[in-house]
Amino acid sequence: MILVSDKAHVRTITLNRPDAMNAFNGALFDSLTEGLLEAGEDSNVRVVVLTGKGKAFSTGLDLSEVGKDMEPPKHGVPGLFRTLVDFPKPLLLAINGFAVGFGATAIGFADISFMARSAKLRTPFTSMGVVAEGASSFTFPRIVGPQWANWILQSSSWLASEDCEKAGLVFKVLEDDALLEETERHAHIIAANSPTALKRNKDLIMGPIREKYREAIEKEGLVYEELMGGPENMEAINAFLEKRDPDFSSIGRR
C-alpha cells in the first residue's frame, strides 16, 4: 500500500493505490501508520516526504468500501491521526495531484507542503453531509485565517494550486515534473542540520498545540459519527456511487 525509499537522511513514503486514486481503505490507513511509526523510530531518518503515486495525492476515504463487511484495521483513522499529531520529525508533503478529504486536510499535519501546478484540492465534507475531519477545523483557520478556512471547509469547492499558494495553505507550487525532486531537495537541506535540534525544534513548535489537535479531532469525530449514516450523508453517498449531484432539498434540516 506504500512505497518507501531512503536517500541519505530523507525517507520518501509514497501512497500506492493509484488505481483507487490513493483513496484510504483500512489497509492503507494501517500501512501509512506503520510506515510513519517506523520512520519516527529510525535514527537514520531525519526528514520524511509524503507523496502519492499516479494522478492523485489522495482522494480521501474510499467510499466504495463504506458499509462493507471487512476486517477492522489495526490502526485505522484514529491511529493515523494520533501518529501524525505525535510525529517527532519534519514532515513534508509533495501533493502531486488530486487532494480530496483527508488528502487535503493532511496539510494540517505537515510542517511544509509543496503542490504540483496541475494539482487541485477539495474538502467535500459539507457536500457529503458530514463535517470537517483531521483536526482541520483547528488547523486550517490557524494556517490560512478564518476567511479562507471557511471558504475551503464550507463550500466544498475545488481550489487550484495557485489559490492554495495564495491562501498560504502550501509553501510553494512547483511544475509537475519538478515536484518530487524539489520537495526532496528542500528535505535534504533540512536534514543536513542537527538531528537533535530538528526534533527539539519540532517539539517546541508542536508541543503547545498538540492538545488542541487532539481536542479538534475528538470534537470532529463526535459530530462526524452523529451525521454519518444520516439521511443527508446517505443521499450524498448514493449520489456519489450513482455519479450524480446530491439533492438535499427534500431532506429535513437539523
Image: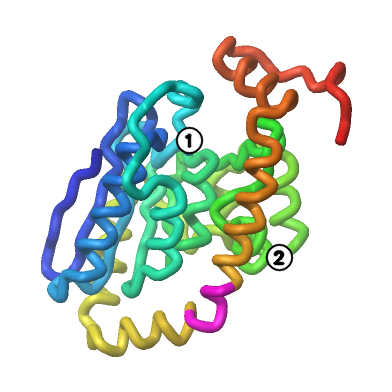
Q: Is residue 98 above or below residue 80?
A: above
Answer yes or no: is residue 235 visible. yes
> Where's the N terminus, which quadrant?
top left
Which of 170/84 is in front? Answer: 84
Magenta span: helix, strand or loop, mainly?
helix
Amino acid carrying label 1: it is: Leu
* Residue closer to the observer: 211 or 104: 211
Magenta region, residue range: 207-211
Quick check: 98 above or below 112?
above
- Residue 217, position as x, y percentages in the image: 58, 58
Residues at marks 1 and 2 touching, judged by CB atoms closer than 8 Å:
no
Q: Residues within 10 Å of mark 1 (few under 14, many from 20)?
A: some
Residue at image x 61%, y 42%? 123
Q: Quadrant of the C terminus?
A: top right
Residue at (66, 57) in percent of width and height: 219
- The relative height of residue 29 versus residue 5 in the rendered view (above or below) is above
Q: Is residue 132 magenta?
A: no
For residue 91, side relative to residue 249 (left or right): left
Mark on residue 61? Answer: 1
Say left or right for 90 vs 62: left
How much space separates mark 1 and mark 2, taking CA atoms? 26 Å
Q: Secondary structure at mark 2?
A: helix
Dividing the picture into quadrants, the one containing residue 198 is: bottom left
Q: Which residue in the structure is indicated by mark 2?
A: 145
Between 154 and 119, which is closer to the camera in this rendering?
Answer: 154
Q: Where does residue 93 sit, x and y in percent of width and height?
A: 38, 56
Q: Residue 244 at x, y = what percent?
A: 64, 13
